[in-house]
């Protein structure tokens, strides 16, 4: 069985010299989006069966493959 990776990494955002609180909040939001903290929380909010996870991953890969195919097809036409 595959184990679920749990991140126990603390995200720290410190106030810089002469930085406004608004900029601090904006930096925090950007950093949390980059590390996908909210996405990870929403994803793990409900239990998903392993077969459901595999199925979603399969269709995600197919979508990427189809996108590459379309891109390649357009490049050949030019």
Image: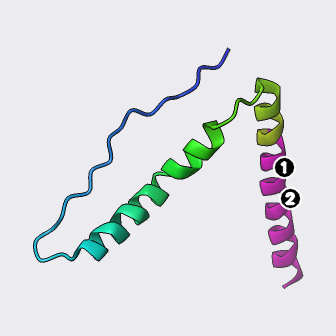
Q: Which mark is residue 62?
A: 1
Res 20 quadrant in image: bottom left
The residue positioned 82% from the left and 55% from the top of the image is 63
Above/below status of 69 relative to 62: below
The residue positioned 89% from the left and 81% from the top of the image is 77
Q: Main secondary structure of the magenta part?
A: helix
Answer with left or right where residue 49 lies relative to residue 46. Answer: right
Q: Where is residue 59 drawn, in percent x and y?
A: 84, 46
The residue positioned 59% from the left and 20% from the top of the image is 3
Badge 1 vs badge 2, beta-carbon distance below 8 Å: yes
Q: Which mark is residue 66?
A: 2
Above/below status of 27 relative to 19: above
Structural distance between the alpha carbons of marks 1 and 2: 6 Å
Answer with left or right where residue 6 lies relative to residue 46. Answer: left
Q: Where is residue 30 drawn, in percent x and y?
A: 42, 65
The residue positioned 28% from the left and 68% from the top of the image is 24
Residue lying at the far left of the rendered structure: 17
Q: Which mark is residue 33?
A: none
Q: Secondary structure at mark 2?
A: helix
Magenta highlight range: 58-78
Please state, as top left, top right, bottom left or bottom right, where the C terminus lies in the image. bottom right
Q: Secondary structure at mark 1?
A: helix
Res 55 quadrant in image: top right
Residues packed near mark 2 inside 10 Å, few (<14), some (14 to 19) or many (20 plus): few
Please state, as top left, top right, bottom left or bottom right, where the N terminus lies in the image. top right
Res 50 quadrant in image: top right
């Amino acid at each position: 069985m595959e184990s679920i990776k749990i991140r126990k990494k603390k995200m720290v955002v410190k106030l810089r010299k002469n930085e406004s609180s608004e900029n601090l909040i904006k930096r925090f939001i950007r950093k949390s989006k980059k590390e996908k903290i909210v996405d990870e929380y929403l994803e793990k909010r409900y239990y998903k069966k392993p077969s459901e996870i595999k199925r979603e991953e399969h269709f995600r890969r197919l979508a990427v493959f189809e996108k590459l195919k379309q891109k390649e097809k357009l490049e050949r036409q030019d």
